[in-house]
Image (tube, grey):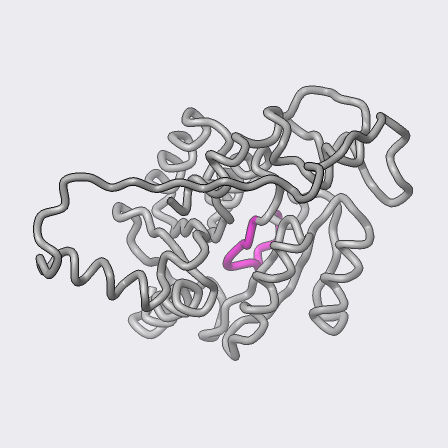
Amino acid sequence: MTETSTKTRREFLAKVSTVGGAGLLFPSILPTAAKGANDRVRLAAIGVGGKGQHGLGIFLGMEDVDLVAVCDVWDPNLQSAIALSNGKAKGYRDFREVLAREDVDAVLIATPDHWHSIPTIHALEAGKDVYVEKPLSLTIAEGRRMVEASQKTDRIVQVGLQQRSGTHFQSAIERIRRGDIGQITKVETWYNENHSPNGIGITTDSEPPQGLDWNAWLGPAPNRPYNHNRRVHFRWFWDHSGGKVTDWGTHL
């Protein structure tokens, strides 16, 4: 580990926190050196739908990041992500093949919630640092195993939490800690949302569309027939999400 490479990795994560819209570093994790021969970070992405491609757009705007691999079980997402890299990134449908690559330093994970823990733990065990979208995990038990894995491997884990590292939030936290608004004894937060005007609607079970590996999409979740809403609006299904509590509730 060199001082330069360690500093580079710290700067990389600082950029993600500031530019990417937020991050929570587990305090027990110490920054480790990039594995590359130079000071560039070689990034892979697992789960490259809307949120994943948004994150990739931010990473690709960093001059010291190279996107080398993208992975998704839905071909349109995969091809779109490859195009974002101008064809430089190799596409995969199995995340294990991505993590087997020795030239990957860090991994962006933006899968549905039920697929957060397994690739995160495997990535850490493979010596990669991880940026995983919120919520950290589907269950408390999964989250604990992820933290244990990060501590055991001494790799960096950062949870993407939109806006939390924004300057306006940081300013508010500083003022509170300074006592500018006195002692806080009670905080109330709330959020009320439905997909207007009629929720997500009802879709019937059907055959998976061509280009989708439905069994891989389900992964560790219970075996269910394909349903368009289950895939597109997965946060409305307990198999894949904690609902709005673990979606918007994490922000509150």
Judge from the rendering whether residue 134 lies leftward or rightward of residue 109; answer left or right: left
Judge from the rendering whether residue 204 lies leftward or rightward of residue 169; answer left or right: right
Residue closest to the far front: 197
**Residue sitting at 68 percent across and 56 percent down?**
70
Image quadrant holding the C terminus, namely: top left
- The overriding secondary structure of the stretch rendered in magenta is loop
Q: Which quadrant holds residue 13?
A: bottom left
Percent of width and height locating residue 55: 57, 61
Percent of width and height locating residue 77: 76, 54
Q: Which quadrant holds residue 227?
A: top right
Asked whether 173 falls inside the magenta stretch, the response is no
Q: Which quadrant holds residue 15?
A: bottom left
**In the image shown, does 249 or 58 lie closer to the viewer?**
249
**Residue sitting at 64 percent across and 64 percent down?**
68
Percent of width and height locating residue 129: 45, 53
Judge from the rendering whether residue 187 lies leftward or rightward of residue 245; answer left or right: left
Q: What stretch is highlighted in magenta?
A: 100-109
